[in-house]
Amino acid sequence: MKYDNIKISVKGILAVCCLVGAGYGGESSAAVSDEECFFLDMPIVLTPSRLIQNLKDAPAAVTVIDREMIRATGYRDIPRLLRLAPGMQVGQERGSTHWVTYHGMGNDNPSWMQVLVDGRSVYSPGSFDGADWNGLPVTLDEVERIEIVRGTDSVAYGLNAFLGVINIITRSSADNPGTKASIRAGNAGIRDASLEVGHDTPTQGVRLNAEIRRDDGFSGLHDARRFKIVSLLGEKRLGGHDELMVRLAANSGTRELGYPDSTYNNNGERSADSLNAAFHLRWRHTPAPGEEWQLHYYHNQDRTAEEWLASAQLGPIRADVPLDRNRSSMRDDVELQHRLTLSRNLRAVWGLELRHDSVNAPFLYYGAAQQRSGMARLFGESEWRFGQDWSLNLNALAEKFDDDSLHVSPRIFTNWQVTPKDTARFGYARAWRQPTLFERYGDVRAIFQGQLLAQPYLPNPNLGAPRIDSLEMGYLGRFRDWDTKLDARLFMERIDNYIYRVSHPEFVAPLLFATIPSARYENLASPVTLSGLEYQLESRPRSGTRLLFNHTVISRSSDNHAITQLTAPYAASLSWMQDWSRGWSSTLTLLRMGPMAGGTGFVPRGQYVSAPYTTLDARLAYGTKLSATPVEFSLTATNLGGRHQEVADRSEQFLHGSDPVNRTSPMAWLTLTFRPE
Amino acid sequence: MMCMPALHFAVRIATGFAAALLLFFCTASPACAESLQVTVVLSENSGAYLEFSDALRENLLKRNITPLVVEQPDGAIPHSGLVVGVGMKAAAAIAASNAPAVLNVLVPKSGHEKLLRDFPRRANSKTYSAIFLDQPIERQIGLIVAALPDWQRVGVMYVTPPGELAQLGREMKNYGLVLHEQAISSAFPLNAALQGLLKESQVLLALPDAEVYNSSTIRNILLTAYRSGVPLIGFSPGYVKAGALCALYTTPGQFAAQAAGLIRKFGYTQTLPAARSPREFEVSVNEQVARSLGLQIKNAARLHEEIQDFERNEP
């Protein structure tokens, strides 16, 4: 199954860029006299949803990765940036496969935290209900900031936000419009290019971003990837109070997966061709600066073609069994949200959302290729400032999936501003996580001439929803010394009904059960508890210097020891960003990750834990002008701390004992950017 | 030798007394007001111009003066009495006419100065005056000091450097503020200028330069500044609505009240004082933006009070 007819062509991207440029280039900006500028009726630019809730008022710990940081690191992927937030535990099984979690706790395709692009969930039933980080239809140039809510936030973002939220917010077309371009080239076949063309007038704006990302991945692995992303944004402002946004984006590409020596080639070397497309429509009505209505509709669609041949020697017979993970899925979602300021001290937001998911994957859902799921939710949040220094956040969410019972998630937080520079936060939240379609209904069978050879995934329709009870205490402080900010979170998270994969020898054993075990997802009878401390210290000791230190320590407890190992007991990172003036700047990031058993695949007995590692990323940049055009040259390198393993493919690793199969490799690239910010 | 503050105080008392006397005589002798012919010429018959005209009419009617309103600048401009020009289009038409006594309002200081250059006969005239849209420098500094007392680095952008820029820098220095200025040109466009300025500044002070601040650029400026955590201080309520932290401005009603006072005095003295800044002002604060940026800012009434104190204590 190929999707050649729907791949994005480079020529097509360039043609659209030219059209966009031509269509909007001729419009001149409104001429206004000095006198008129006193009386202009301005649009509400910083609407309530654009305003970031100040961390002092937020009912959760939030880390913001801003554009300064995105640019300073020079990274090519969003997941690598996420390593720079406390509590995040991110690893790469290979260059093109990211394992992104908060406090570990992920299954094969981690989906215990919500991932949103401008409020649009990127989780896909077609990506085993996880996020396809390579396939995200968003370019790095578009990203304004990434907000990471550390700790459960289901009450605001639904049941997927069980452990936290990654909220990717893209720039408005009015934000620095113009033409920008960059090219990258480096070792491991790195050949990237990106282009942005944008134009903005008082009444409308349009921007087109296109990006090509290519590399050969980690050395020694079947790991090349070739991706093209195109994203078209249109904004129409109707008077000063209404704004219509439409975004059309697609990511199409190929990545290499698998290993040459997997058992029966059941994880054989192969290519996966994917297309992820999104259509997002948003109407924003701002009757007054403190009030806003938003109506969203989005449609996500993805398709993946991933086929290969497994073969087993059954006595004298060689059984060639075609395997595939071909899948396609669609998600339609509509959401209404109303933010309002009830009084000087009372603000509220309420909303409702309806969603429909469907997935088609004959090989993953044996005998029931088409799976569907519906969801409805209603939520409300209020922020009440009582007294001069206290605020109280009361939130609740009611969510209903298909025939499951209604889940209600409450949250109560109080923030106390002890002094203008110190804020303490105390809170409790309860949330649920809806089991994914694949966890419940995934049924994968390898059949040869009517004989069941293997059934690695068995369905479990009775799988219950895990529940988290989270208690936390937070502190936000500012110190004059070195212009320092401290954001600390002391947490205790108890997860009941944890979902994990369990082997079932009592079922009718397929022929190759001994080597390809049958397993299904089940709820753990006893709770899993995570408690610990994480903090971020940010300092600007002198002009041009920014230091960022993240540190997390987690104590894990469960009757099932293997589950505790899914979380690294510690992680830390130190970033030093320096502006050396005269156009020179540099960034160094040192990351230390504790032992962690993250990864994909299933081995019934025993648990493989990747060893702790330390790695170094660096960037050196020089900005200048080439015939009046600002340009920047930069050299970026990642994984300089020696080759190490981050997360494993458990089945493959099992074949190789303690010798890490999939080590990272250093990558370095030169970037030339025209019109950097 | 009398020390300066005492002298200043004495002058203020004397001025106040003289004004009170004038007011008394004008009120006591309606003849001088009744005989005054006032014509209000609007640049446009809408928006702030119309709001001003309605408020002035109301003010003058209380004093038994019935103004004649000319709704377009190309309408007939009388050759006698006092002509009030509302906005630059009206002011330009009146300057070119034979109107003997002229009071312009809702005009920027730069526009007024240009008219004096274009019509030299109007310069140094005791019957040609204006109330500027622009706020006095010390008042703007007063707002920064009152709203953001711990902040020092103030950024401004312009295409045409305002005449008072050097004075603004000097006065700021007196209050421990540092002015970072950035000229915008075709070689150094807005985006580049803004990025550079935001690195140096803790707060942006918007200047009424239409080539920098207009409805085409305001989104970009506000979004970029906000992303850098730098608040904008505006010069009209529209800015606060759009997302500026606060703004200081004079409403059409306040302009009308001040103009009515000058007109009454003119009825008695047949002269107009020198062109000047507006006397009354308002302050608006966007509390949502302040809270989002983590700023503890005083409310508008308190800021107004502190700015008035600041102006009173200005050396």
Image (spheres, coloured by chain):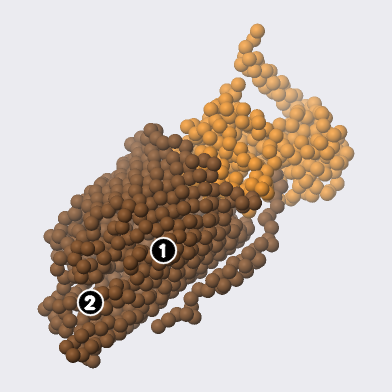
Chain colours: A brown, B orange
Identity of the residue drawn at 42% across and 42% down: A546
Q: Residue furthest bottom?
A: A449
Determine whether the residue tagged by mark 1 lies in a helix, strand or loop: loop
In this picture, residue B270 sits left or right of residue A609:
right
Count residues near mark 1 (Cα–Cα under 10 Å), then give few for <14, some for 14-19, many for 20+.
Answer: some
How far across and down, in percent of the image, does residue A408 sit? 28, 62
Q: Residue furthest top?
A: B1
How far across and down, in percent of the image, does residue A222 sit? 35, 70
In this picture, residue A616 sits left or right of residue A209:
left
Q: Is residue A366 above or below residue A119?
A: below
Which picture quadrant has residue B118? top right
Q: Is residue A502 above or below residue A59?
A: below
Label 2 marks a residue whose chain is A
How far across and down, in percent of the image, does residue A149 sit? 35, 54
Identity of the residue drawn at 88% across and 39% down: B98
Label 1 marks a residue whose chain is A
Count residues near mark 2 (Cα–Cα under 10 Å), then give few for <14, some for 14-19, many for 20+.
Answer: some
Is residue A427 something one can see in this rendering?
Answer: no
Q: Amino acid at mark 2?
A: Thr
Q: Amino acid at mark 1?
A: Ala
Disc on res. B153: none
Q: Is residue A217 above or below residue B154?
A: below
Which picture quadrant has residue A476? top left
User: How far apart, in angstroms, are the residues tagged by discs 1 and 2?
Assistant: 28 Å
Residue that label 1 marks = A188
Disc on res. A263: 2
Q: State the residue in front, A311 or A563.
A: A311
